[in-house]
Amino acid sequence: MGVINVEKSGRLEGVVQIGGSKNAVLPLLASTLLTDEPCVLGGVPALKDVDIMCRLLECFGAEVTEDRLAAQIRIHAKNIKTNIAPPDLVKAMRASIVAMGPLVARTGSVGVSLPGGCAIGERPIDLHIKGFRSLGAFVECEESEDGGGFVKAEAGRLVGAEIYLDFASVGATENIMMAAVLADGTTIIENPAQEPEIVDLANFLNKMGAKIRGAGTDVIRIEGVEKLHGAEHTVIPDRIEAATFMLAAAITGSNILVDNMLPNHVVPVIAKLRETGVYVREAFGGIEVDATRGMLKATDIKTLPYPGFPTDVQPQFMAFLTVVEGRSNIIETVFENRFMHIGELNKMNAGIVDNGRHALVPGGASLKGAKVRATDLRAGAALILAGLAAEGLTTVSDIYHVDRGYEGLTEKLSKLGARIRRSES
Ligand code: EPZ
């Protein structure tokens, strides 16, 4: 199992290029099951989760051709040979669940084993099931003690419906949208997720011939069509990767350019960095982050569904707040257990108080290098950022989490001047 070694790195400098969005490309890949014609996705990041989704599409019968050099993937789901998702792949990546919508819409049935809970929360799928049932599918769900189990959905042609989401779930919105595009009649999703990844999926589906309006707002309207055709699409940049590098600049007191990203996708992160005194300027197609202009100060964070502050940036922002002067309060409202990184940061002398959904960051910490463990993808990124500012060596283990969601994180940080390297020990 590899580790990432990080040492105090002083000021970073230069330009970092942001890759395609993990959380956009996974549902985009799943949506190609909706047509028997070939689709081409560009700007695809080289991530473990993308590999797993491609294997999953092949298991369903799709022909997948990857051109890594061009960051392009061609998917042709001409025939679906099975509707049952292999349990090992679903266990490896819970986002596999978004294959349900396309498969039940295209073939009338799907069976997926449930991976159960994970480090950050129980991850139920009750809203996904509510959506499929509203569209006329018969859904059976056998839960096991660990929250795992098996879910099966069967339907003739789905029928448009009005669906209210009790929580603006990203995955449920994606699954319902992909199921509804081939339904008979109109589907209205109220209180949907409004993340940019939802908009990117709707844009691709509309290129395929779907009729979706309102993605990115609080009501999505879908007119069902008979059939979808193939299409080409370039994945939006990864706003969470961009935010991670913005915070790398902040925690090291650096001035860098985060390029090839969309500033309007990280508005809450820009706002919160400005509240701490970091200078942020929107440059063409990117963002200049300048944390060299004097004393930084604390601020409070509350995570919310988009356009609120993103939960996927909470660990990284917490790492930054440990070193600025003053107390910060962080409230995590999206996942029930997304403070696993507090214990690891406290091994580095962060002194954070974990009150369940509320964390109190005293600030002004002199972080010390330590042996720490990535408990999930974004916690791993947060520990690497903390290592950039900590005296001595920080060794981050369980870095397979990091490889799932970041393409070349250590290489990109190293190019900015970070003292970081992987070792396979
Ligand atoms: C997506 O997960 C992202 N993953 C997550 O990113 C992200 O943190 C999350 O959205 C929130 O923005 C991908 O897109 C692959 P949710 P998802 O359904 O769809 C509850 C990362 O680090 N809920 O919006 O699983 C659920 O328990 C990952 O890149 C229900 O109660 O998130 C959670 O508390 C981590 N019932 C909340 O909603 C349901 O049926 C948010 O979950 C579904 C969800």
Image: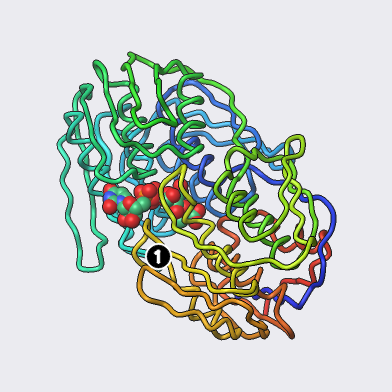
* Vertical arrangement, residue 210 with respect to residue 6, above or below: above
* Vertical arrangement, residue 189 with respect to residue 119, above or below: above
**Residue at which label 1 appears:** 120
Q: Is residue 130 left or right of residue 30?
A: left
What residue is rendered at 25% in x and 29% in y?
108
Q: Is residue 86 visible?
A: no
Q: Position of residue 40 (x, y in %)?
A: 59, 28
Q: Position of residue 338 (x, y in %)?
A: 42, 66
Determine whether the beta carbon of the residue marked 1 sits less than 8 angstroms from the nearest atom of ligand 1: yes
The quadrant in which residue 302 appears is bottom left
Name the residue nearer the viewer: 107 or 286: 286
Q: Position of residue 106 (x, y in %)?
A: 33, 26
What residue is rendered at 20% in x and 29% in y?
135
Q: Secondary structure at mark 1?
A: loop
The quadrant in which residue 48 appears is bottom right
How was this image coloured? rainbow
